[in-house]
Image: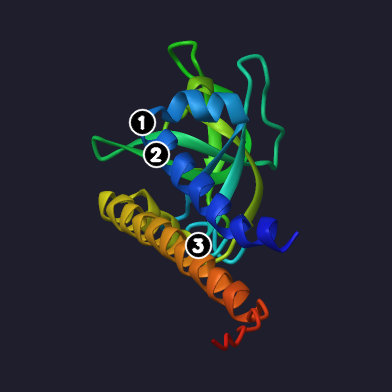
């Protein structure tokens, strides 16, 4: 049992590194398979409900699924010509002049709807829960530097395990040799 428990941190680290690599290489496939995605809250628009720097877990909405009024949703927006992901309250829909349906969103303490024009295809999913203030760590783990550092740590852990098992075997062998009774020496007289 102790041997199994000894490898649990290593297994968890390997799983974390595998998840980080897979989410960087195949983000859409992984989120579709798991059905959930994490996002980091970078602004204070949802304070005090969700603090800046929190990681939110979002349940992906299926194509035929609609959010409920009052849900916190995560959605794509065009912010000053750049794609961004926001997490705000969903307040309802309105039909625009061109016949398209606009999804109305609102920040936590805002007194008006967001200026962003969001449609159903922009909505990623609904908020499940958040973990306060760990977003900086999550952003670090997504960076290329983190992958390099985690690779180095895994390499060191593998070397450590190899050396530790070698020293452990040598120590057991030396202990077994010291515990064996010495054979009595015979005195020969001629």
Q: Is residue 78 left or right of residue 40?
A: left
C-alpha distance separating marks 2 and 3: 29 Å
Mark 1 highlights which residue?
A: 25
Q: Which of the two residues, 42 or 91, is positioned nearer the viewer here?
A: 42
Which residue sits at x=70%, y=42%?
A: 70
Question: Which one is in front in this view, the residue at disc 1 or the one at disc 3?
Answer: 3
Looking at the rendered structure, the secondary structure element under dot 1 is: helix
Instruction: Find out whether the residues at labels 2 and 1 contact each other: C-beta distance under 8 Å.
Output: yes
- Residue 6 drawn above or below residue 21: below
Looking at the rendered structure, the secondary structure element under dot 3 is: helix
Q: Is residue 153 left or right of residue 176?
A: left
Density class for disc 3 (Cα within 10 Å; few <14, some 14-19, many ≥20) is few
Density class for disc 1 (Cα within 10 Å; few <14, some 14-19, many ≥20) is few
Q: Which of the two residues, 16 or 153, is positioned nearer the viewer here?
A: 153
Density class for disc 2 (Cα within 10 Å; few <14, some 14-19, many ≥20) is some
| Marker count (numbered) | 3
Instruction: Find out whether the residues at labels 2 and 3 contact each other: C-beta distance under 8 Å.
Output: no
- Residue 99 drawn above or below residue 43: above
Looking at the rendered structure, the secondary structure element under dot 2 is: helix
C-alpha distance separating marks 1 and 3: 34 Å
For the C terminus, the image quarter is: bottom right
Mark 3 highlights which residue?
A: 165
Which residue sits at x=72%, y=33%?
A: 68
Percent position (x, y) of residue 11? 56, 50
Q: Residue lying furthest right in this view?
A: 1
Mark 2 or mark 3: whose residue is earlier in sequence = 2
Percent position (x, y) of residue 125? 59, 33
Mark 2 highlights which residue?
A: 21
């Amino acid at each position: 049992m102790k041997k199994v428990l000894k490898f649990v941190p290593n297994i968890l680290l390997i799983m974390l590194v595998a998840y980080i690599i897979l989410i960087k290489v195949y983000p859409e496939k992984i989120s579709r398979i798991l059905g959930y995605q994490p996002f980091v809250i970078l602004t204070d628009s949802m304070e005090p409900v969700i603090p800046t720097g929190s990681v939110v877990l979002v349940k992906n909405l299926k194509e035929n699924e609609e959010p409920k009024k009052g849900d916190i949703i995560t959605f794509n927006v065009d912010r000053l010509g750049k794609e961004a992901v926001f997490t705000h309250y969903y307040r309802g829909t309105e039909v625009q002049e061109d016949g398209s349906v606009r999804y109305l969103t609102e920040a936590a303490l805002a007194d008006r709807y967001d200026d962003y024009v969001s449609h159903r295809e922009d909505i990623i999913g609904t908020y499940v829960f958040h973990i306060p203030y760990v977003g900086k760590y999550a952003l670090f783990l997504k960076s290329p530097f983190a992958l390099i550092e985690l690779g180095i740590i895994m390499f060191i852990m593998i070397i450590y395990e190899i050396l530790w098992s070698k020293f452990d075997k040598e120590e057991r062998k030396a202990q077994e040799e010291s515990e064996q009774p010495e054979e009595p020496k015979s005195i020969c007289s001629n």
